[in-house]
Image: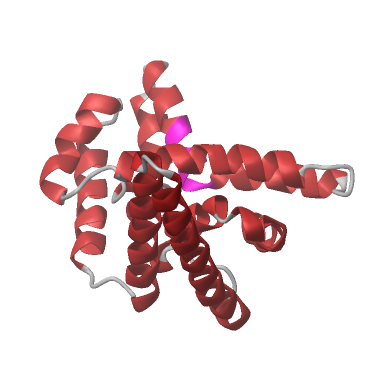
Amino acid sequence: MKKAVVIILCFLSHILTAQTVADSLTVTEKYNLLVAYRNSCFGQLMLVDSCSKAGDSVAAGAHLMRVNPYYMLLEVPAPGVLDSFLQHHYLTTSAIRRKYLDTFTKVYNTPKSKAYLALEKMVEEDQLLRKLMEAATDDSTADSISDRILLSDSLHFAYLLKYVHRYKWPSIANGSIFASVIALHDHRHHSLYLPMLKEAVL
């Protein structure tokens, strides 16, 4: 499920860019959106990959240190496998890997916020319902699951709207990645989610 979330987020970044980089955006806003994407965890990880392929372990390590460990939780289930994961995927120095592992371990061992846990649970529900819909073999079952999806999406939207009004879009430590997946899947509320996402990204 975690790799699926990362793939979904890649699509989200393209959808967000395509729908917000419109004629209504100023040149400055378009530039700021590009900079925000480059400085995001996903953007930094792409730079780690590019620098690794170019053989520049120092630059790769510098970009790795800018990747929030909460983002890596989607890929790596526990600190014990992080070092081998980094060695297998990226070219970084052992000192940087140890430093990043220490940072990751602290985040891993820190109790997650209520918002993080709530949004993670919502994404799990979202994924489950959509898998059930894909497996439905008759119209009656599909209709029943569709109703459950509509209800689930509405409840998730209500939670997020209340959260955003109180705190703005959640930080990565409060589940922004999960919130983005929820927003992507909730087609009925896209027009309401996009301004929130645009503001958060910019």
Does 56 sit above or below residue 68? above
Image location (x, y in percent) of residue 195: 72, 61
Q: Does residue 111 appear anywhere in the picture?
A: yes
Q: How is this picture coloured?
A: secondary structure
Q: Residue at x 42, y 64 (%)?
A: 175
Left or right of 94? Residue 39 is right
Left or right of 199? Residue 29 is right
Specify start and end residues of the magenta stretch as a single range: 40-46
Image location (x, y in percent) of residue 178: 43, 58
Q: Residue furthest bottom?
A: 166
Let me know if residue 44 is in the magenta part: yes
- Which of the pair 1/42 is nearer the observer? 1
State which quadrant residue 135 falls in. top left
**What secondary structure predominates along the stretch shown in magenta?**
helix
Let me know if residue 112 is in the magenta part: no
**Which quarter of the figure is the N terminus placed in?**
top left
Q: Residue at x 79, y 49 (%)?
A: 29
**Which quarter of the figure is the C terminus placed in?**
bottom right
Q: Residue at x 13, y 41 (%)?
A: 81
Q: Residue at x 39, y 40 (%)?
A: 134
- Which of the pair 52/150 is nearer the observer? 150
